[in-house]
Structures are given as C-alpha cells and as structure tokens.
Image: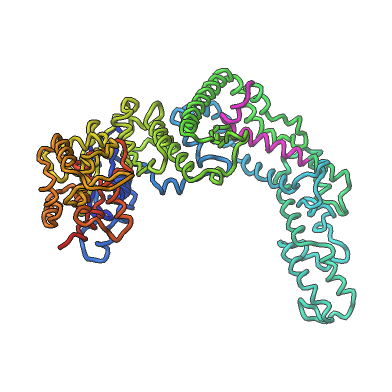
C-alpha cells in the first residue's frame, strides 16, 4: 500500500506534526481535545485542494514578528483533491424548502452512467434540435409570439381577455394614435411622432398648472379662450402614456408577426388594431381565440425545443407521445400561413424521422428508467436503513420532478413530504443527515482524500456505530476511499480495530494515537492488543518494573474496579493518604487497622508487588522531595497527575481538579481503553498546570 508521510509546520498551535496516511483505507487518528486535530484537517485539505486557505493558519505568535516561516504541508504525493467534513460543512449544509439537501439530483442520481445514458438518448433528438438552430427566424418569432401572448395577460374564467391586459389597454377604446380625435388634431404631430407616450406623459404632467391662470404652462403664452384650455386638458382624457406605449409596442410586434397569421386572421387583426371606437364583443372574442392559438403553438414549440428523456420518462406509449408533439397547423388555423409552414414543416419532418426510429429509443428510455429506479431504491434503502438503525423517526424519498429528481423528507407520523426540513431537525439530526449525505457527495465527486474532523463524537453509542456502519460498510460506502478520521473519541477505534473489527475488514482500518509536546504532534500505532480493559492495564502495570508507588496507585484502582474493598484496598488507600497507622473504612465505622489485619493485607499485596513495604512507602509519601523526584522522572502524563495528587492534590481551577480526581478514581473510566503509559491521553495543558503548582 502507498503511505503518505505528511509533515505539517507552522499551522495555528502546531509547530511540527508528522502523520502517516495509508492510501485506500480508513485512517483513524485518536487524540485528546486541544491537540490541534482540526488544524491538521484544515491544513491537509487546504494544501491538497490548493485553495489558498493554508496561509490563514499562520500561528498568532508569528503574525506580529518578522519571520520567513509560513504554514507548510508536505508529503501528500499524488493527492490532488480533498473533501472535508467538519462543523463548517454542517453549518453550510443547505436544507432546502422542498428538498432535504441542495442538489440532491446531482448527488444521488447524476452519476457518470446517468450522463452517458442521457447523452445517448440525446442523440435521437439531434435532428429536431438542428431544425430549430438552423432556422434564422424561429428564435425571434417565438419571442415575438410570447410577447404578444403576455400582452393578453391571464384569461378570465370565461376565457375572455382581462380589461387590465396590455392589449385591451392599447386597443380596447380604439386606436387613437392613428385615429386622432378632432379636438386634438392640433397635437397630431406629437401624437403621431416618434415617441408619443413620452409626449403624452409630459403633457399630462403640466395640466395641473392650467388652473393657476390663463398662461400656458408649456410656452408661457396667454390662453384667452377657455376652448384652448379644454383642448390641452383633453389629452389626459383621451390618452394614457402607458396605454400609448403598449399600443406602439404591440403594433410593432404584430407587424413583425404579420406573415405568420392566416389571411383571415390578419384581416381581423388589422380591424382590431385600426379600430376607431371601443372594441366590440366579437372583436374581443377574436382576441381571446387568438391568444389560445398563440399559446398552443408556443407550448408545442417549447416542448419540441426542449425534448429530452424527461419529456418521455413517465409515458408508457412513447410513440403516441411523439406523435402528439407534431404541430398540426390545421388545428391552429389562425396561424396557418405559408411562412408559418416554412418554419414548422422542417421540425415536423425531423419528428417523423424520429418516429421511424422509435423502437430503439423506447428501449433506451426504458433501460435508463430502470437504472434510475435501481439507483433510487439503493440510495433510499441505504439512507433509510441507517436512519432506522440509529433510532431516527425520519425517512427519505427520492421523487421525480419535471426535469430532475429531488430527495424529500418524511416523518413516521406524516404521510406527506416535510417542507423546510431544517425547521424540524435537531442539530444532531442535521449533523447525522449531513454526514451520511456527505458520503454520497464523496461518491459523486470522488476526491482523492476524505477528511472527517471529529464526525461522531457528539452522538450516543448506538448512533456512533450506526454512522460508522453506514460510512464504511457495503456498496457505496467509503471503504475503499483514502479517509482520514480525526477524533477525540476512542470508541471508533475500539469498534473498527477490536470489538467489531470483522464488520469493517473491507475498510482495512488502521488506528493511531496522536499526542503533542511543546507544539510537536507525533503518533503511535494502535493495534488490537493495545485496546484493553482497565483491569488488564492495571494488572500489567502492577506486574511491570514500574516504580513501586506507581504500582500501588494502579493496584488500588484495580481493587476498586473489582469492587473488592477489603483489607488490601484499605491498606493501599491509607498509604496514598499518608497515614502512618492504616485505617479501615466502612459504612458503619472508621477505625485503626489491627497489626494482624495490616500483616495479612501486606502479604496479599506482596503477592502482586513483591517490593511492597507499607512503612517504607509511607516514609516516601511523607517525603515531598522524593515524590517530586518521582514526578519529574516519569514522562507519562497519567502518572504525573497521580503523583501530583499525592504531592498536592489541590488546584484552584475546578475543571482541572475534576480531571485529576477522575483520573485518580474510576468514576468515568471506559470499560476499554489504551495503556496510559504508551498512549498519553492527558492534555498537555493539565500537565503544565501540575508543573506550575509543584513546590519549588
């Protein structure tokens, strides 16, 4: 296997880090909080993606001094792309209003096989597309038809044209641009000018000043006659600037479209456009039927222009659907003209050619539908199986949209799809969804490296295992992807390396322990045999060549684990409390241990620690300098805090005090853990606090 020997330097709190990643497997890196795991994740991802963000990790201590040191990552070899799952990914994870995750189509359906099949099907429609692209007029004609259709607005319930539509505003009261009322003939030059709507607007704005006197507000000349005022005011009664604008725009569109109307339609339309008076009910009815004809032609043109797999996806009789796409101008007779046929006939001819080849097309569409259905079933089964096993009462359903597919969210108590999933999912649920959907995004994008930054520490034990199982088991998982998982939780390592290692064999997991000293991160491999019960660890330390006092600490804890609070336990507890005369504590009393009890307890302990001598060890315990020397001689943080408690035992910070006390007793120990002599999980800052408080 390929090993990447990665070196990181000058990144946040990390001066140097040396980490090995094995290609194509799950690499678990376990270490305490505060070590710099997130920095490791960001640094490696930034370097591999070459996205310019590595410079952002420059340590604060280097930002205000002159230095040539910069954040660096080396040893990534042939890794060219990385996807990282971290808190930032969860926070930016877009739960859409009608979709569990943004771009679910691209993530779950749009595979390379999907694209290849779509390309193959698209070849069948190439002739129709060329018929559109080779027609110089088709795009402008379609646009003009849509402009005219939009001018009709939405039809009333009875199919008639709304009075608020542009076309009724323009022509409803007659064409008063070409037919200027007698009273307004003095203004004919302006009304029929190049920009009548602008003139009408300007003229109307000045009307309010006519009442102020007999002087024209436009030219300041005297208006002695009331008739002249009435003439000026008549413009606002006869004209509306927006209506004039609509009229001119529609006249231009109708003129461009004239050749596409049948002769009878054009004749009737000319009557409407040039009407002197208000439109009659018959003329309005004609406009309604014209709108229907235009809408029908546009719909068919758009259907043919965008013809694709989606248009035929839900049709059992594809040949009948294709036949229905043919444009029959006999049924749209208002638009049946020689010029229209010049545009439509080539398109219909290509559709006829396609119908001759419909059998292989039907086979292609059918095969593609089957592949998509299988993909949907597999993805739904995978995600819903995870949700169920993890105890979530949600499921997902991938449904067809007009030109896509979307993943919808369903709750056990609701048959309908849930909109705005983010409003209903807790943070933990969003995190779990984001993590599992991240896996599918990885399968879609296929990066060289996947980085998981503490992905499951916030979940309970059952959900942790369910997520691990989903991510690294079975088809579609990450089991053959080069994956770096950074975690402060030992449970993933226990699960994949020891407890259920057989289930994760295909992922070929490797685990290691990260520790830091003075800004330098190093790692130690974790094997199956390294994961032991604490009873095993205590027994091994007691049987080792460790310092006798350290052995006594572990043996006392061993008795605690076994719930054996007999004389041997009481003798060890008395030793660690520096009692010259050992005592026996019980629920009922606290008393001095008898000579016989002490001798029997000492003999029991000597069977495990031959050098044990209570009186000699009490002397050491009462000799502060001796304890400090032992503290200084050990490099194991776990033993340092045991000895610190024996020397001092107090700390002004309740959090650190609790950490020391819980390491001394067994309140929160895992059943399984790593040997603290080899895998020093005590955070460096705790050891430094102990160093600070040691007597000088």
SS assignment for the magenta stretch, majority: helix
Q: Quadrant of the N terminus?
A: top left
Residue 586 is drawn in which quadrant? top left
Q: Residue at x 71, y 47 (%)?
A: 150
Q: Residue at x 83, y 52 (%)?
A: 172
The answer to whether residue 622 is above or below residue 441 is below
Q: Residue at x 16, y 43 (%)?
A: 595
**Is residue 312 within the magenta segment?**
yes
**The magenta segment:** 290-316
Looking at this view, name the residue that lies furthest to the top: 359
Residue 362 is drawn in which quadrant? top right
**Is residue 269 within the magenta segment?**
no
Asked if one can make out residue 597 in the rendered structure from this viewpoint, the answer is yes
- Of residue 532 and residue 2, the one placed in the foreground of this image is 532
Where residue 103 appears, as percent x and y from the top left, is: 50, 40
Where residue 106 appears, as percent x and y from the top left, is: 48, 36
Where residue 233 appears, as percent x and y from the top left, is: 84, 70
Q: Along the horizontal axis of the image, is 390 left or right of 224? A: left
């Amino acid at each position: 296997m390929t090993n990447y020997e990665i070196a990181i330097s000058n990144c946040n709190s990390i001066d140097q880090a040396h980490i090995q990643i094995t290609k194509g497997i799950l690499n678990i890196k376990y270490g305490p909080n505060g070590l710099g795991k997130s920095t490791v994740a960001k640094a490696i991802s930034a370097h591999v993606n070459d996205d310019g963000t590595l410079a952002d990790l420059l340590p604060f201590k280097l930002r205000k001094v002159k230095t040539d040191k910069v954040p660096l990552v080396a040893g990534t070899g042939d890794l060219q792309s990385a996807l990282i799952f971290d808190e930032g990914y969860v926070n930016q994870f877009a739960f859409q209003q009608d979709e569990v995750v943004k771009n679910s189509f691209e993530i779950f359906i749009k595979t390379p096989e999907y694209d290849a099949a779509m390309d193959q099907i698209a070849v069948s429609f190439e002739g129709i597309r060329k018929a559109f692209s080779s027609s110089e007029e088709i795009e402008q004609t379609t646009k003009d038809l849509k402009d005219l259709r939009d001018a009709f607005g939405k039809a009333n319930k009875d199919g008639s044209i709304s009075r608020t539509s542009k076309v009724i505003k323009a022509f409803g009261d007659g064409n008063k641009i070409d037919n200027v009322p007698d009273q307004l003939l003095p203004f004919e030059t302006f009304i029929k000018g190049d920009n009548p709507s602008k003139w009408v607007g300007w003229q109307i704005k000045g009307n309010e000043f006519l009442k102020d006197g007999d002087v024209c507000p436009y030219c300041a000349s005297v208006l002695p006659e009331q008739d002249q005022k009435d003439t000026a005011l008549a413009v606002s009664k006869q004209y509306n600037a927006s209506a004039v604008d609509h009229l001119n725009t529609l006249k231009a569109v109708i003129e461009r479209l004239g050749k596409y109307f049948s002769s009878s339609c054009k004749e009737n339309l000319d009557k409407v456009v040039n009407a002197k008076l208000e439109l009659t009910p018959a003329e309005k009815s004609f406009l309604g039927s014209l709108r229907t004809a235009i809408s029908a032609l546009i719909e068919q043109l758009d259907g043919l222009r965008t013809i694709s797999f989606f248009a035929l996806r839900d049709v059992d009789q594809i040949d009948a659907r294709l036949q229905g796409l043919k444009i029959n101008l006999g049924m749209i007779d208002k638009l049946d003209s020689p010029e229209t046929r010049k545009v439509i006939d080539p398109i219909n001819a290509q559709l006829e050619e396609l119908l001759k080849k419909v059998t292989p097309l039907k086979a292609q569409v059918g095969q593609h539908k089957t592949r998509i259905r299988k993909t949907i079933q597999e993805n739904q089964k995978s995600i819903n199986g995870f949700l169920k096993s993890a105890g979530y009462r949600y499921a997902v359903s991938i449904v067809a949209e007009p030109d896509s597919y979307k993943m919808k969210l369903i709750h056990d108590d609701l048959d309908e799809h849930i909109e705005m999933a983010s409003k209903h999912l807790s943070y933990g649920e969003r995190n779990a969804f984001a993590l599992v959907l991240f896996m599918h995004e990885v399968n879609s994008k296929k990066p060289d490296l996947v980085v998981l930054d503490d992905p499951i520490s916030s979940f309970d034990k059952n959900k942790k295992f369910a997520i691990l199982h989903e991510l690294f088991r079975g088809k579609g998982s990450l089991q053959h992807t080069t994956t770096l998982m950074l975690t402060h939780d030992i449970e993933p390592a226990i699960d994949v390396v020891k407890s259920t290692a057989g289930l994760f064999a295909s992922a070929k997991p490797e685990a290691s322990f990260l520790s830091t000293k003075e800004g330098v991160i190093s790692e130690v491999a974790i094997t199956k045999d390294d994961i032991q019960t604490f009873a095993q660890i205590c027994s091994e330390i007691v049987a080792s060549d460790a310092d006798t006092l350290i052995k006594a600490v572990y043996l006392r804890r061993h008795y605690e684990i076994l719930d054996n609070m007999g004389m041997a336990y009481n003798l060890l507890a008395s030793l660690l409390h520096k009692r010259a005369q050992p005592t026996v504590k019980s629920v009922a009393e606290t008393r001095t241990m008898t000579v016989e009890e002490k001798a029997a307890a000492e003999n029991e302990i000597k069977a495990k620690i031959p050098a044990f001598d209570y009186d000699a060890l009490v002397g050491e315990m009462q000799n502060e300098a001796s304890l400090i020397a032992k503290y200084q001689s050990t490099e194991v943080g776990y033993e340092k805090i045991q000895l610190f408690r024996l020397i001092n035992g107090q700390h002004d910070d309740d959090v650190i005090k609790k950490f020391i006390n819980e390491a001394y007793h067994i309140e929160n120990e895992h059943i399984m853990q790593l040997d603290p002599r080899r895998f020093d999980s005590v955070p460096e800052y705790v050891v430094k606090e102990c160093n600070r408080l040691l007597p000088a």
